[in-house]
Each structure stands twice: as C-alpha cells, then as structure tokens.
Image (spheres, rainbow, N blue to C red):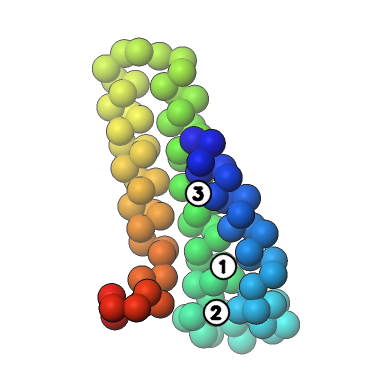
Amino acid sequence: MLATHIQFTLGLILYFVSPNVQLAFKDFGLAMKSSNLRLYALEHPLVMLIALALITVARAKTKRSDSNSAHKTNFILYSIALLLILSRIPWAKWPGLS
C-alpha cells in the first residue's frame, strides 16, 4: 500500500508539471474533445485515484478481519483496482506495443 501511495504522489507531481496537462488546462473544453489530452488530464488521474481508494479500503479491511469473507472481498477489491490501473495505462505510447 505504501508503494501505491508513493506512486500516486509522484504521479500528482508529474501531473502538475506535464506539458499535456498544462495544454489541457488552457482550454479544458477543447481538451475533452481530444482523446489523448482527455486521457492525460482527466481519465488517467481520476481512475488512478479510484484504484488507490480501493486498495486503501482493501488494506484496511485486511487489518480488521481474518475471516474468509473478508479475504474474498479483498481479492475482489484488489482485482478491480488492478483492472482499473491496467485500463488507464497509455499502452500506445510504449515502443513496440502499438
């Protein structure tokens, strides 16, 4: 969980210095029409924040209970968080994957 929070903090720092986000903030309406700018300015950070919240809730539930139902709930929450994270990674920007 600590690694996730550190990653999110670094992501926030990069978010506010990113030229893509700076461009999107100049005209947010226009940015919403561009899928690339919308991904970097809105979708990616919002989905990562939701995934971070799910990971934090799952970790808190793990600390409180040792029952099988709690572990099933944690598995579901961690799985949803992983799917959210993987869905918003800009895979097309990685060389050799597009």
Residue 59 vertical position relative to residue 54 in the rendered view, above or below: above
* In the image: residue 8, left or right of residue 57: right
Q: Amino acid at mark 3?
A: Ile
Q: Position of residue 1 (x, y in %)?
A: 49, 35
Q: Residue furthest front?
A: 95
Q: Amino acid at mark 1?
A: Leu
Q: Amino acid at mark 2?
A: Leu
Q: Which mark is residue 42?
A: 1
- Kindly report the distance in space between the C-alpha atoms of the residues bearing marks 1 and 2: 8 Å
- For mark 3, what is the residue? 50
- Kindly report the distance in space between the C-alpha atoms of the residues bearing marks 3 and 2: 20 Å
Chain-order first, disc 1 or disc 3: 1
- For mark 2, what is the residue? 37
Q: Is residue 53 visible?
A: no
Residue at point 55% right, 60% down? Answer: 45
Q: Residues within 10 Å of mark 1 (few under 14, many from 20)?
A: some
